Image (spheres, grey):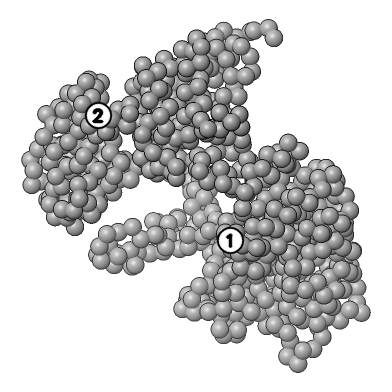
Amino acid sequence: MVRSLPDEIIHELLSPALHVPDEEFSATVPHTAYVRPLESASAILLVSKSWLRIATPLLYNVVILRSRGQVQALELALRSRGSDLGRFIKKLRIEGGYTVALEKILAKAKNLTDIALTLELGKGENVKGICQSVRSIMDALEEYIPKWTKLTVFTMRHSPSSTDMGLPVSHNEIFARALKSAPNLRTVVLPGIESPMFEVIGHIPNYLLTLAGIPSLQEIRSDTRARRPMKPQCIRTFQKSPRLAELIDLTLLDAVPKKTFIYPPQLTADPALEDAIWDRVLSFVYATKARRPTAWYHGVVSYDRGDYDDFDGDSMDDFNEWIYRPPRRVRPLLVCKRFLRLGTPYMYGRLMTSTPEKLQTLLHKFDEQPLLGQHVRQLCLNDWAHKNRADTSRLLSHLPRLASLTAEEHDPLVLPWKLFDELSVRCGATLDTFEGLPVEKPEGNKQVDPIVFSRLVNMQFFSWESNVVFYTTKKNTDAFAKLEELMISRADVSFYTVLSRMELPALRCVIFTADKLSSSHVFFKKHGGKLEKLIISDAVFGVDILNYCPSIRVLSIVSNRHLQIRSPIETFKQCDSHPLLERIVFRALSGSVQTDEHGDKHPDKFLSTFDRTLFPSLHEIEHMLFGWNLAEAEMLKHPYVKWAEKFQKEGVELVQSPGENYRPRRLFVSRSSKRRGD
């Protein structure tokens, strides 16, 4: 390869890829990620000899050791013949792998300027290696800190806690004693310096008094990422020590500085432009994605913070102020008349009737101002607020442009058939989402006309949970012409017959969570060929259903039983070839899986009998047990590592969530294993 770039430019290009931010190097969380689903940074060195020469100092500049295998590999590299890699190590972070090899690594790192130690050991680890090198950590600090003439900033990890209340000596006290002899220490960063814990303690902890006695110290400041106003009682506590009050900037902590805002004069000159800009701003203020009950089946964690702020106060006065604070969605409208006019359509764009009182307030508002109902596009209902179905019908009558009607996942509203029929008449032209709302049978269990589905001309996402019986004599071929996703949780046989007589040209995804197939075969036989994604209960998944869907790219098998997934081994052994299938997903009803006879043994059997040739495009199998973000000791015991390595050679990744691929690790090899030649 002809070189066209000088070393300096290549150095600048490679630096960002091999850079470790100071925040990550000095992070005080218990563990940074042991395994990351990324390609190893050392792969950059394999591109060419020039890249190897230029990137090697960058790679070794900051070294983070998280396992005994990594420590062993680094020690081997440093003691190899002619190796001078140790001189490149400037920063060393040790999160694990405490072995005797650490002594040799520290001896080779002559230019070390920064070191970060975490002493939370995993099973089978000990600090023998590090102790042999620097003896006791605190003794070493007291001995060497006077020699660290360039140490100017020290960050403590621990916030004030109960250990500062006269109980055993805190970590901060140990470090404070060691820092007394630091010749040029200027700044100490203490997370939680504004913590209300000082108000509880009522006195100045010993370690702060020790720090205040350091002659060279100029300031003690808080971690700016977690800054909060300090309580007056805390300020009075610190003012008991004049030296400490001098070091801590109490004025900044006492009040949050106010920013001066100057309104741009260009906006007042053009009212139309002013409205357009503020309308755009408010659209982002109120922007939110509707919570869909089917989100979990697609592997999406749905979270809505609601209308109120999270409580972050420390006292009853703070709580009283918080509870009477206007809801978050209302506050922008209180700024000025322009915000009220421009923001009203956005605030009413998505409504959630969470309580009967809120529903009555909303109905009263719509009765007074009927035009407000035209702004409502998304509505979420729950059973508690809608005990009176007449109020629900009255609410829907005010919403002529309703596009999305959903229910709360844990308290869904059951719609009477009459109300569902009224909904199709009133909102059928605009409604595109109907999810999570079971429908009751009509009185007398009468058969009903499926013409109701023909009115939903704009429906794209539809879920059905009902035993309503339909007439099957009529054909509604044009119904649900725009339907893309269909979820069936419970249905009568007649419902599948009605669907089989529709064309459903846009249908691409089916979520089938019913416990019984009933006569759904007639539906899958008609529409299975157009599906690209199938999400189905493991209780009903079988060979016939899979063979009816030859074009699917994603197959998700879900379990309605708590914490159990049953892998359909025989189904995959007997099915036809599926050349387009790319992903197979196993998902349990809950967020975790127990390693019992259903959750542990079945994935193992499934992997051992899986025929890769039937699925040539497959590149990922997802299961909750295929998690690789583990410490070294847990990784060694992981039952699916061998399968991950085997399938990876065949081009298939075993993952716990999309993109978190398994990457082989350098594992620790004991001396006994070396002697045996293992």
Query: Can you give x and y, in whole percent of width and height, for residue 449 in the image?
Result: 83, 81
Query: Can you give x and y, in whole percent of width and height, for residue 576 in the image?
Result: 89, 53
> In this rendering, does residue 327 appear at all?
yes
Give the quadrant of the N terminus.
Answer: top right
Q: Nearer the viewer, residue 330 or 535?
A: 535
> Which residue is depicted at the point 23% across and 42% down?
172
Taking 498 as reference, is 2 above or below it? Answer: above
Give the SS element for disc 1. Answer: loop
Q: Nearer the viewer, residue 552 or 666?
A: 666
Give the quadrant of the C terminus.
Answer: top right
Give the SS element for disc 2. Answer: helix
Taking 530 as reference, is 227 above or below it? Answer: above
Tally of numbered discs: 2
Query: Can you give x and y, in whole percent of width and height, for residue 176 in the image?
Result: 19, 37
| 274 left or right of 321 in image | right
Q: Residues within 10 Å of mark 1 (few under 14, many from 20)?
A: some
> In this rendering, does residue 425 appear at all?
no
Say whether disc 1 or disc 2 marks the residue closer to the N-terminus: 2
| 94 left or right of 207 in image | right
Query: Which residue corresponds to mark 2?
Result: 140
| 45 left or right of 257 in image | right
> Which residue is depicted at the point 58% across and 34% down?
665
> Which residue is depicted at the point 73% across and 36% down?
649
Query: Which residue corresponds to mark 1?
Result: 594
Query: Can you give x and y, in whole percent of width and height, for residue 308 in the image?
Result: 42, 63
Taking 568 as reference, is 118 above or below it? Answer: above
